[in-house]
Image (tube, helix red, strand yellow):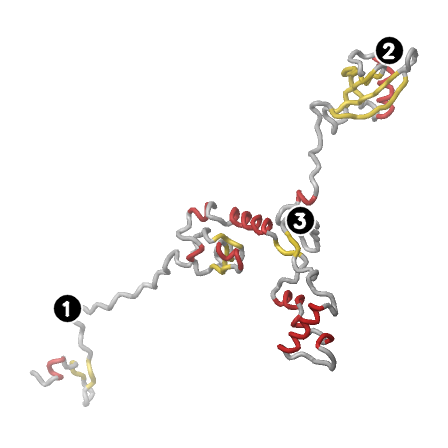
Amino acid sequence: MRSRTPDRLCAEAVDLARAAAEETALPGMVGEHIEVVADGDRVVTHLFACNEPGYRGWRWAVTVARASRAKVVTLDETVLLPGPDALLAPEWVPWSERLRPGDMGPGDLLPTEADDLRLEPGYTGEDVPPPNSPVAEGMAADVADSEEADVVPGSPAVQPAPARGGIADVAEELGMRRARVLSRYGLHAAADRWEEAFGAKTPMAQAAPATCMTCGFLTPLTGSLRQAFGVCANEFAPADGRVVSLSYGCGAHSEAAVMPKPPRPAPPVVDETVVEPLALRPERDGGSVEEAGPAEELGHS
């Protein structure tokens, strides 16, 4: 059982403990003696202050002990330990948890774990019937009868199934021949991120005149995400090229405002009260006469 009272001889061996600490530390880095801690029967640890600039609150711990009925105190170990108020490095966080969106650069690789909750197994080919099995023979016969296949002499059971008739090729044509696909967890996690970044609760959406659901620049997604998200295709919008919620909105909405028409010039105003001087026309004999007015041209005198 651990003794709460330090052994007297071990507790008095302060000089021995200090010498051991000074031998381990750099010169002048061992400070004052702080306390004595009883670790067990005839086992004591002496604590000294550490004067290292980068180790604020750390302490040199020197453990000494003596054998039963022995009066000679011996040295066990010397270590540097953090105190209650020590300056410690932050807790280690794995790189997979430190990584944030936008940290990836050109040439960086981001492997995904085998048990990543965001992914689930896609088409692996495990359901493909083995060659020459009854199922494969039936598939080959059906394909040979229904499609234009290269038929070789012999039984339909040995006819090779055309490439377009295999399960793997059908899966590839449908875009499903991937080792892993997005799971429901991964789908919901992505939807939560998009909703937080470009959703109805953002300040931009709160001040928008209308939602993206009625905007002509919205390009809907396919699949189940079509019901809640789309891609903004307005180069002047803050979310151009981003996945936005249908409840998001901004001032670049296609129906936010009508462009004003260019102003028309005012119609000309004719002032008939102004009398303009009549121009002179040349006479045949070289003289000049006053140009006739409108009444004279009409034959009225």
Q: Marks 3 and 2, how far apart in space?
A: 59 Å
The N terminus: image quadrant: top right
Secondary structure, mark 2, is: helix
Residue that appears at 71% across and 33% down: 89
Question: In the current view of this chain or complex, which residue is farthest to the bottom?
Answer: 285
**Front one among 141 and 286:** 141
Q: Amino acid at mark 1?
A: Thr
Precedes in sequence: disc 1 or disc 2: 2
Question: In the current view of this chain or complex, which residue is farthest to the left?
Answer: 301
> Would you name the residue on which mark 2 appears?
9
Q: Nearer the viewer, mark 1 or mark 2?
A: 2
**Front one among 110 and 222:** 222
Q: Give the crowd class for mark 2: few <14, some 14-19, many >=20 residues within 10 Å.
A: some
Secondary structure, mark 1, is: loop
> Would you name the residue on which mark 3 appears?
116
**Front one among 218 and 165:** 165
> Would you name the residue on which mark 1 appears?
273
Which image quadrant for residue 265? bottom left
Q: Nearer the viewer, mark 3 or mark 2?
A: 3
Which image quadrant for residue 38? top right
Precedes in sequence: disc 3 or disc 2: 2
Precedes in sequence: disc 3 or disc 1: 3
Q: In x, y percent, where is residue 118?
A: 63, 50
Q: Amino acid at mark 3?
A: Asp
Residue that appears at 71% across and 65% down: 129
Q: In x, y percent, where is residue 214?
A: 42, 57
